Image (cartoon, grey):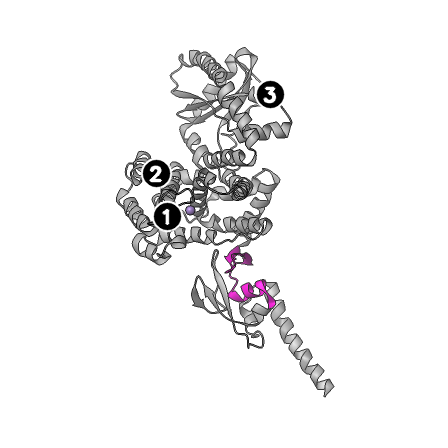
């Protein structure tokens, strides 16, 4: 990957994009990472460039692209977030800081790690662009997984398929979800992957192409009589989804494969319904297979008309009919698409997230995640990081006192000051989502200050502080009686 390719791609998508700043970010990152190499032996800068390229492909905004180029600088080089802020402004610096914090989650056993990662992602819902950078970073790491030892490959692939991919789906970034899943599938089930790949890509390819051509010809014959502008594509089915279907329905490849899928893309919604009408007059629709996601979009915002008909050679054939805009949204996610189109404020919590939260009906894992996101947004929980890389969940406006007691009673009792994001702060300072918090203790300290009850927000911390003074009173009474 080269910076020229990155810039060319960025201009392809947005001809007005400021390329000098992209170039400047590259020069800075290249200098910072100079001399470093990836496990594969390539110069390190390849990785941030690929990350930026992936971000451009999902239509990320300029700050996000820049942050993608700079995302590993604070963690791996001598330059700091402050350097980035001075050179590239606060917006970019905040994004890079978010990514750096995500990287601080240390791996200490799968269960704990997964929990931490999930919480951190939830914390990042506030600025979804950080999640996008993390996804694009992970996508490139997956593509270079071969350079890592097998146990690491397995761990990363598992973690991606169990945590990253469902979140990508939840956010409607199908393009990333599919790519992640197919790469992980290859590492997690290599034998099955190879078999499916052979069948789908080689054995059945020409048959599939012929069938597509014949169906297209029949449809075009009718469409020619109208003045509708359209595009007809064969729909690529990704291997992991075929495999999942085979598992779930316990069917053989041929039964699954027998469903052919086509996509018709038109200019406006009216034409979607016209095309649907035409398809239903040519072929007999299968009952209960028609779905109008334009009138009633899916909870994540997905819009399209779906129908399955008995098509050429009596084969069941699936059609998706949508506008260009709907198609783009389904590939890149609603939020990214909007960013690029209308430059809406990124920090507002978009309404569609709330909508997802209300009605999302997916698998159990996703459901649980949705509930957690809901509670973050609506009940105002925050997540902060400990120096050991654990994520601690606290109520909004919690202070280092709550944090200290959440870690350990002794830490709470002996706390004197806090370091918040590496800066000294009082114990009554309000914490924010994603803060990195460390408690400075004084070993000689006797116990908590009763004033702390005013700053503590959690029941747990308050109880411990009260308990301490009660114990102290009890001790006094005991001593009096023993005298
Ligand atoms: Mn990275």
Comparing labels 2 and 3, the label whose residue is closer to the camera: 2
The residue carrying pointer 2 sits among few (fewer than 14), some (14 to 19) or many (20 or more) residues within 10 Å by Cα, namely few
Q: Residues within 10 Å of mark 3 (few under 14, many from 20)?
A: few
Is 230 magenta? The answer is no
User: Residue sitting at 55 percent across and 70 percent down?
Assistant: 454
| Residue for badge 2 | 1
The x, y position of residue 149, in whole percent, is 50, 43
Q: Secondary structure at mark 2?
A: loop
Residue in the picture at 49% in, 17% down: 208
Q: Residue at x 40, y 13 (%)?
A: 224
Q: Is residue 213 visible?
A: yes
Whether the residue carrying mark 3 lies under 8 Å from ligand 1 is answered with no
- Tag on residue 368? none
Q: Which residues are magenta?
A: 381-409
Question: Of the residues under marks 2 and 3, which one precedes in the sequence?
Answer: 2
SS at badge 3: helix
Which mark sits nearer the N-terminus, 3 or 1?
1
Residue under label 1, please give it.
67
Label 2 close to label 3 by CB (< 8 Å): no
Marks 3,1: beta carbons within 8 A: no
In what element is the residue under mark 1? Answer: helix
**Quarter of the image containing the C terminus?**
bottom right
Measure the alpha-carbon separation of dots 2 and 3: 41 Å
Mark in the foreground, 1 or 2? 2
Q: Does the stretch in magenta take in 398? A: yes
**66 left or right of 293?**
left
- Location of the N terminus (image quadrant): top left
């Amino acid at each position: 990957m080269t910076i020229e390719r990155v810039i060319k791609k960025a201009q392809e998508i947005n001809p007005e994009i400021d390329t000098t700043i992209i170039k400047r970010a590259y020069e800075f990152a290249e200098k910072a990472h100079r001399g470093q190499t990836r496990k594969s032996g390539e110069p390190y800068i390849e990785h941030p460039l690929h990350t930026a390229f992936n971000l451009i492909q999902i239509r990320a905004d300029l700050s996000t692209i820049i942050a993608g180029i700079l995302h590993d600088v604070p963690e791996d080089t001598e330059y700091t977030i402050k350097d980035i802020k001075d050179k590239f402004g606060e917006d970019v610096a905040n994004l890079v800081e978010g990514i750096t914090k995500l990287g601080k989650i240390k791996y200490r056993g799968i269960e704990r790690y997964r929990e931490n990662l999930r919480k951190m992602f939830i914390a990042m819902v506030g600025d979804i662009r950080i999640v996008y950078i993390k996804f694009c970073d992970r996508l490139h790491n997956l593509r270079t997984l071969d350079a890592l030892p097998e146990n690491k490959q397995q761990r990363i692939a598992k973690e991606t398929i169990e945590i990253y991919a469902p979140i990508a789906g939840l956010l409607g970034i199908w393009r990333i979800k599919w790519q992640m899943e197919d790469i992980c599938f290859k590492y997690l089930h290599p034998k099955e992957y190879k078999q499916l790949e052979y069948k789908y890509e080689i054995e059945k390819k020409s048959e599939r192409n012929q069938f597509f051509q014949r169906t297209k010809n029949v449809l075009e014959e009718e469409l020619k009589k109208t003045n509708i502008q359209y595009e007809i594509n064969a729909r690529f089915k990704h291997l992991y989804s075929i495999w999942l279907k085979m598992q779930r329905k316990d069917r053989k490849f041929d039964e699954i494969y027998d469903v052919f899928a086509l996509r018709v893309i038109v200019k406006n919604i009216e034409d979607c319904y016209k095309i649907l009408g035409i398809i239903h007059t040519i072929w007999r629709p299968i009952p209960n297979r028609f779905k109008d996601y334009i009138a009633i979009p899916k909870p994540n915002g997905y819009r399209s008309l779906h129908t399955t008909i008995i098509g050429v050679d009596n084969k069941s054939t699936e059609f998706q009919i949508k506008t260009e805009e709907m198609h783009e949204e389904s590939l890149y996610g609603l939020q990214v698409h909007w960013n690029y189109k209308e430059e809406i404020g990124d920090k507002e919590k978009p309404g569609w997230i709330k909508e997802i939260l209300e009605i999302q009906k997916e698998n159990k894992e996703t459901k649980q995640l949705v509930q957690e996101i809901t509670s973050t947004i609506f009940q105002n929980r925050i997540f902060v990081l400990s120096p050991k890389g654990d994520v601690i969940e606290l109520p909004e406006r919690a202070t280092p006192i709550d944090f200290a007691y959440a870690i350990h009673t002794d830490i709470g009792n002996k706390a004197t000051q806090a370091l918040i994001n590496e800066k000294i702060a009082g114990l009554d300072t309000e914490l924010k989502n994603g803060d990195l918090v460390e408690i400075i203790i004084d070993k000689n300290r006797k116990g908590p200050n009763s004033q702390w009850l005013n700053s503590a927000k959690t029941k747990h911390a308050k109880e411990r502080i009260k308990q301490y003074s009660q114990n102290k009173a009890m001790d006094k009474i005991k001593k009096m009686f023993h005298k």
